[in-house]
Amino acid sequence: MSSFDVVVIGSGPGGYVAAIRCAQLGMKTAIIEKYPTLGGTCLNVGCIPSKALLASSHHVEEMKHFADHGIEVSGEIKIDLEKMIARKQAVVDQTCGGVKFLMDKNNITVYEGVGSFENATTINITKNDGSVEQISAKNTIIATGSKPSSLPFITIDKERIITSTEALKLKEVPKHLIIIGGGVIGLELGQVYLSLGAQVSVVEYDDRVLPTMDGEDSKELTKVLKKAGMKYYTSHKVHKVERQVETDLVEAINAKNEVISLEGDYSLISVCRRPYTDRLHA
């Protein structure tokens, strides 16, 4: 059994930075990651890919206003979403590759599998083939991050009723994207597809979007995105999300107890995230 001074479970920004620092301080360090690539949610299906798509969609938005600056672009602006998604993935691959380079540079042992505790100092690593390898750790850092949450009555099929992960790799620009939850993740992805030509509707339980952030930020972003065409349904409690043949039906109740119905081809569930501690057995 291999022994380490520090074992880090999870290779996101919290995990890989901690592993690097421990190695720099002279500790024998290992990191465990259940996915084939390092970097966790942020680098693979979070901040990095969403910002890459946002950058592409901003270029589209800017081109719409070139004429205001005396720059004439003849013909229709065409969106190649497949190429846009491929560029996003290239950015992700480069960034994740950089983390792998840092692991090698700092002599950090990388294990692919699901880490769980056998006891306080023994870590089980369950591989994809079902085999289990054990390692010993004097100290363990849990950096397993988070995963998307949902609502009890919603069935996420990852096709039409999706999370942010699926929204980052759609094969078409939605005709009407319904976003349930007006937090930063939903609004960011909503802005991407709004710029690419989608109709976007945001349903939020609170009386404003970005309810956990400063009120002035919420007010300003609401104004900017509303001007761009995003529709808001604040103070609305969603009680039904139903997959139909080619569309989704979303029903919500407002503060006056009135029911509204929205029909779109994609519903993005973006209500919040929850800590991912499944299978740790801590």
Image (cartoon, grey):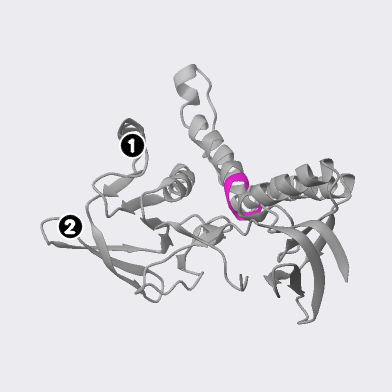
Q: Is residue 162 left or right of residue 107?
A: left
Front-lying residue, 271 or 90: 271
* Image quadrant assignment for residue 123: bottom right
* Res. 249 image quadrant: bottom left
Name the residue located 58 percent from the left edge and 57 percent from the top edge. 145
Q: Is residue 241 left or right of residue 45?
A: left
The residue range painted magenta reads 43-48
Report the amino acid beneath label 2.
Asn
Q: Earlier in the sequence, mark 1 or mark 2?
A: 1
| Residue 169 visible in the shown view | yes
Residue labelled with disc 2: 254
Amino acid, disc 1: Ser
Residue with the mark numbered 1: 218
**Residue 75, visible in the rendered structure:** no
| Residue at the extreme top | 70
Q: Position of residue 33 (x, y in %)?
A: 73, 62
Secondary structure of the residue carrying tag 1 is: helix
- The residue depicted at 32 percent of the width and 37 percent of the height is 222
> What's the residue at 68%, 58% (across, down)?
10
Query: On the rendered image, what quadrant is the N terminus found in?
Result: bottom right
Rendered position, 189 above or below 140: above
Q: Main secondary structure of the magenta part?
A: helix
Identify the residue at the far left of this view.
256
Q: Is residue 44 magenta?
A: yes
Element assignment for label 2: loop
